[in-house]
Amino acid sequence: MRIHNFNAGPSVLPKKVVKKSAQSIINFNGSGLSLLEISHRSIDFLEIIEKATFLIKRIMNLNDDYAILFLQGGATLQFSMVPYNLMNQTAAYLDTGFWAHNAIKEAKKFGKVKVLFSGKNKNYTYISTNYHIPCNMDYFHCTSNNTIVGTQMKIFPKTSIPIVCDMSSDIFSRTLDFCQFGLIYASAQKNISSAGMTIVIVKKNILETIRKNIPSYMDYKIHIQNNSILNTPNVFSIYTSMLTLKWIENKGGLSILEKNNQKKAQLLYDEIDKNNLFENKIHKENRSNMNVTFFLKEKHLEKEFNKMWKKENIVGLDGHRYLGGYRASIYNALPLKSIQFLIEIMKEFERKFS
Ligand SMILES: *Cc1c(COP(=O)(O)O)cnc(C)c1O
């Protein structure tokens, strides 16, 4: 039975990755041990970290100026770890959604935050490019994809200060010049692996200005020195992410995934725009290729629509609890077939009720 998994996170992973990961829980590399039973200091695990690091650098075209870390605490911990490490006085932030807003809230505990743009009074339905980044800020923080509302930054500003980006919900979904970023973080449960692990990609030289005495777990430099095993890491999630990274390369890398993702998103947005019963509220140039949000124009049809998709093995289509409506999260591993299936349901619904 095929389940169409539109969950926002934890979310759909490649079938092959899940299968291999499951086998490794029973018997890891023929060792007779479960992946859950191996030491995080064993050669086997060190090879996994090394391989994952190597693949991330190759996929993103990054050189050894960058360090790759596999941490815990989710993107949420990064909301405070970033200012703890990088903020001396003032940092610039974009307020483009609920997660961006939380990042700002945490940063304010460490210093001054200058919000260069806020989409809050327009319900975060667009992202301005019309702002100026003062060059005396410690860093500039943005969220590349706003998972809840369904917007995505298509271009990033040019600036001489480090750009810090929360890429939790669109990392590895498109090609970008990743060297323009000083620090990228992404929790694994959207497009990479299971929950409980966060990838941090940091340009080492931006850490040189730190003057503070930082608690060890919060200090990027200490994690770099310890190769992500300062304490016991999430072995399972790191292993599974390594499998996903291999899958990405086997698919042909980010340019191929980007094409697939654009196609999938375009099909769904086209249907929402054509269909008499649904609407998307995001400015067209900011529509996300990862999280497609839509609403019924007539709210009283909600019960009927919910009944219809829920009986068809579609899961995870409910909008975020803050917003209501619907959200189709269509990450890398979601097959085109699932999009086509959802579109058929939306068409059938239109035929019946409009
Ligand atoms: C999911 C998400 C987060 C929160 O991640 P946690 O791992 O739950 O801390 C932060 N930012 C974005 C953009 C997200 O999509």
Image: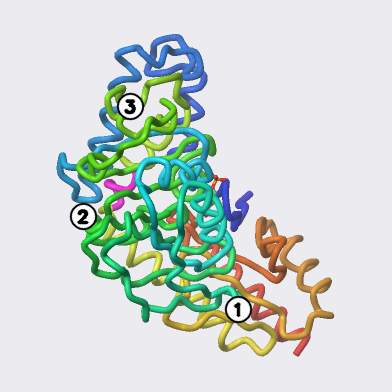
Q: Which residues are magenta?
A: 247-251
Residue type at the position of mark 2: Cys
Residue at image coords 30%, 31%: 221
Between 284 and 306, the residue placed more toward the observer is 284
Residue 244 visible, this orientation: yes
- Residue 21, image x and y in percent? 46, 30
**Residue on which the image places disc 1:** 121
Residue at image coords 69%, 79%: 348
Q: CA distance from mark 1 to mark 2?
A: 33 Å
Q: CA distance from mark 3 to mark 2?
A: 23 Å
Residue at image coords 42%, 54%: 166
Question: Which mark is in front, 1 or 2?
Answer: 1
Q: Tell me: is circle 2 under 8 Å from ligand 1.
A: no
The answer to which of marks 3 and 2 sits earlier in the sequence is 2
Residue type at the position of mark 1: Asn
Residue type at the position of mark 3: Ile
**Residue on which the image places disc 3:** 222
- Residue 287, image x and y in percent? 47, 75
